[in-house]
Image (cartoon, grey):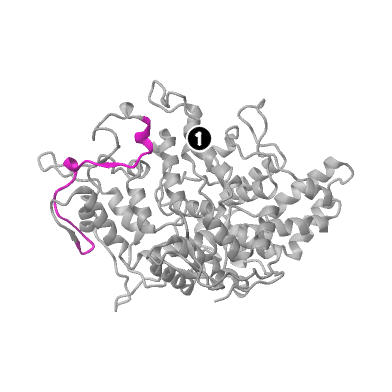
Amino acid sequence: MRAVIVSRFHTPFLLAITLMLFACGGGGGDASTTVDPLPAPEPLSDNEAARFLSQASFGPDVDSIDQLVTLGLEGWLLDQFQKPASLHLDFVLAGFPADGNFLQDNGAPLPEVVFLPSDSFWKTAIEAEDQLRQRMAYALSQILVVSAESDLAGAPQTVAHYMDVLTAGAFGNYRDLLRNVTYSPALAIYLTYLRNEKADQTTGRVPDENYARELMQLFTLGLVELNSDGTPTKKPDGSQVELFDNSDITGLAKVFTGLSFSGTGFRTPVRFLPLPAFYTPLTMFDDFHSTEAKNFLGVSVPANTGGEQTIELALDAIFAHPNVGPFVSRQLIQRFVTSAPTPDYVRRVAAAFDSGDFVLPSGTLVGSSERGDLSAVIAAILFDPEARDVAPRENPQFGKLREPVLRFTHWARAFNVNSADASNEPALHNANRPDLLGQHPLRSPSVFNFYRPGYIAPGTETGMAGLTAPELQITNASSIVGYANFMTLYALGLAPRSDGDAPAAFVPDYSTQAALAADADALLDNLDQLLTHGTLRVETRTRITQLLASLGSTTEADLVRRAQIASVLVMTSPEYIVLR
């Protein structure tokens, strides 16, 4: 398999998604072993580099494009695997009072600490060097979901710890990640198995079933049996094969009993917990763990097995299921490359998941050869022929809507904002509002994420074609207009700030574009490369040029304004909204 690299390409707009948008309002460690010496990188165009970075990072900028052109695709990937992880917990804890007391007298968190995880996300996504790791962690956060739109709003350090679990495990093994999230206080609080107790027949108490259900349904298996290419298997009568029923859920629920905060008693009141308990892996209290046999998915964990061993056996059994590879792989492809991946694409990536390795075009082996290696999975996703070759881009069923979060981070990186300190940016504390971005990291409305991976938009061209288009679930009249207004405020430097006297952050640098702004063609050439990797259609360029002609171009302020408005027009164009 070789990635086809071209000097320039020009693809038609994805008609199905265009019609949909108009209808709605107007989709660790050493990760490689060298088998053969890595050859010199093949020539790579700036446009192709920008496209790759749109898939693999929080957005290309001039420096990252230059770096990718210099290193080549493989060199960049291997370099990203080696970069140290940019984590969140220390940033969040640094914002806490010196005594560690983050609660007010009424038990609510102090206002100044509530948005610290959000502030850390924006800063890291925009400024961190380990861009691929951060993108992978963000993608994993949409599969292994926790949300601060819950009791976690009052525990920012717990959310930060969870973000670090995903970040540290982004290139590790998915089985290890399942263990680490299981023992995380954030997931235990969110899915209500914290201090989950064994059954008591005298009181009628039964173990909480929330995590048992979501672990199987959302994190590992899905609801129905899958082929290796992610398509459902069928019975002779054409019906699908359901994987589990309520008895499997109740059996698995017994596994996740006995977990509570570390360094405390099982029932220590929250107000007496030491601060580290909120960001330390949970402890198993065997006295509260079910001693009954646990039966689920055709597996039986014997009675009187210790709590920690029971969890290991249960996770091993679930992870061993053949559904895990295609189920997880398909969702990761959706987050990086295309909303409706072909079965062949899913099959190839799932094969990398199952083998734990992937061979790059040069012959370099990525991965540990242990099933579930995520470095092999992300390499397989980004270097698949459907991600890199020219032909798939001409297919109107290929591509994805850029998530609103990724659009904003791309803008901030592309125009080199002076600072990504979001502490004074109320719009970035509530970006999930439909009149703003309509999406906020780690703030999904439920454990089902912002959008379902199998979402097919009803009454649309994509729906009639049977295509999954997850991002369309949050695309509507309000969110389309909200995004355009949101980007305009930031591009023009008009975004509201909590403290008007504090130094302004998120101030973009349009100096390069302003120097070109007197010539609309030169300006659009620059923005086309930086934002749309050479895909702006003639029709789009003509409309933007006509609008720019109505603006002044005499003074320096005029030229800056032309650059600002042109950037927003490109970032609200169909060619930008749909990443192909």
Q: Is residue 8 left or right of residue 129?
A: right
Residue depicted at x 69% and y 58%: 66
The spot of residue 433 in percent (x, y) is 54, 42
Q: Quadrant of the N terminus?
A: bottom right
Label 1 sits on a secondary structure element that is loop
Asked if 317 appears above or below 568 in the picture, the reply is below
Give the residues drawn in magenta, as a range. Answer: 275-299
Does the magenta segment cover residue 482?
Answer: no
Residue at image location 78% in from the left, 49% down from the top: 512
Residue at screen point 45% across, 64% down = 367
Is residue 279 inside the magenta stretch? Answer: yes
Residue 148 seen in the current view:
no
Farthest residue toward the bottom? 236
Q: Amino acid at mark 1?
A: Phe
x, y percentage for residue 117?
49, 38
Residue 352 on image: x %, y %: 44, 69
